[in-house]
Amino acid sequence: MNPVLQVIHDRKSIRAYEDRPVLPEVRDQLLQATLRAPTAGNMMLYSILDITDQAVKDTLARTCDNQPFIARAPLVLLFLADYQRWLDYYQASGIDALCRERGQPMRQAGEGELFLACCDALIAAQTSVLAAESLGLGSCYIGDIMENYETHRDLLGLPRFVFPVALVCFGYPTRAQLERERTSRYERKFIVFENHYRRLERADFAEMFREFEARAEAQKDKIEGFVSAAQLQYDHKFNADFSREMTRSVQANLRAWRGEAA
Ligand SMILES: Cc1cc2nc3c(=O)[nH]c(=O)nc-3n(C[C@H](O)[C@H](O)[C@H](O)COP(=O)(O)O)c2cc1C
């Protein structure tokens, strides 16, 4: 396997870190690689917040669904979808005045621009994750950054056209983490289709989720109210409070992005 594929294959999420700082030269290499990520129109529609303030890390550990390892990560980067910079540039360059002369309001960023900026931010985030792995650093995404929109906006000073899409924790893995097995993946035939989307059916699910269901069944005596693996996933993830909060928070963020009253 070539070294790039090796890095991709070896990576796993790391949630426990050695008490060892990420030196400035390592952080620089990581950021340099990150900023080489492909970006729509070469516009770099993202910003990165390097969270160095321990009090902010402590808050994020709480507001991102109570995940204490966030506070213990030596490097925490927040990837923001960012259209604010380009809109501010247009404004600073007199585009609003130009639009007025043309008898049109200056266009604001819509949902399309938000999705494109999210693509940019996530591609940069994943580039940082792979760069980190190649530097011996473990990483873990925190999707819960999309929760508690109002708290995160105020805590981090996020303006209207900035959307926090991924928080990533980095640090040197503990020995136990290094020795831990990687998680498995669903079979390729259920994920990769040719030309046309294929909706999966009952028989596919039986095969696709065989291992997932066997793992849940093996634990069922320890789980109160266990009905099935699907029920467990539904109750504890999909229909959990944090998932509902994420949707509420994203809706509030979208309303703010659209300029609608709160
Ligand atoms: C968008 C996204 C959000 C995630 N959020 C969290 C999170 O909040 N907490 C966490 O511990 N892991 C989080 N993860 C890590 C996943 O749980 C992990 O990638 C998955 O279980 C597969 O394991 P692996 O990364 O070790 O291969 C997230 C991953 C992604 C891609």
Image: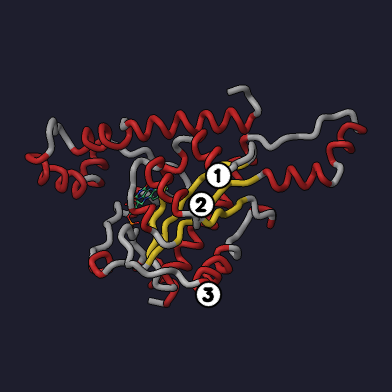
Residue 148 in percent (x, y) is at: 46, 35
Determine whether the residue tagged by mark 1 lies in a helix, strand or loop.
Answer: helix
Query: What residue is shown at x 56% (from left), y 51% (from top)?
Result: 121
Task: Tell me which numbered mark, 2 or 1, is placed earlier along the sequence.
Answer: 2
The image quadrant that residue 99 belongs to is: top right
Left or right: 217 as drawn, with respect to 232:
left
Residue matched to label 3: 25
Name the residue: 55% across, 38% down.
154
The image quadrant that residue 143 belongs to is top left
x and y percent of residue 2 in the render? 42, 77
Q: Foreground residue, 108 or 24? A: 24
Q: Mark 3 or mark 2, which is nearer the start of the sequence?
A: 3
Q: Secondary structure at mark 2?
A: strand
Q: Residue under circle 1?
A: 156
Q: Residue furthest front?
A: 55
Q: Nearer the viewer, residue 242 or 75?
A: 75
Q: Which residue is mark 2?
A: 78
Label 2 crowd (10 A; few <14 / some 14-19 / many >=20): many
Residue type at mark 1 is Leu
The span from disc 2 to disc 3 (Cα, nearest Å) is 19 Å
Q: Please provide percent x and percent y for residue 199.
A: 37, 38
The residue positioned farthest toward the left in the image shown:
221
Specify the quadrant that holds the C terminus: top right
- CA distance for labels 2 and 1: 10 Å
Location of residue 238 by image quarter: top left
Indicate yes or no: mark 3 CB to ligand 1 under 8 Å: no
Kindly state the secondary structure of the residue where label 3 is placed: helix
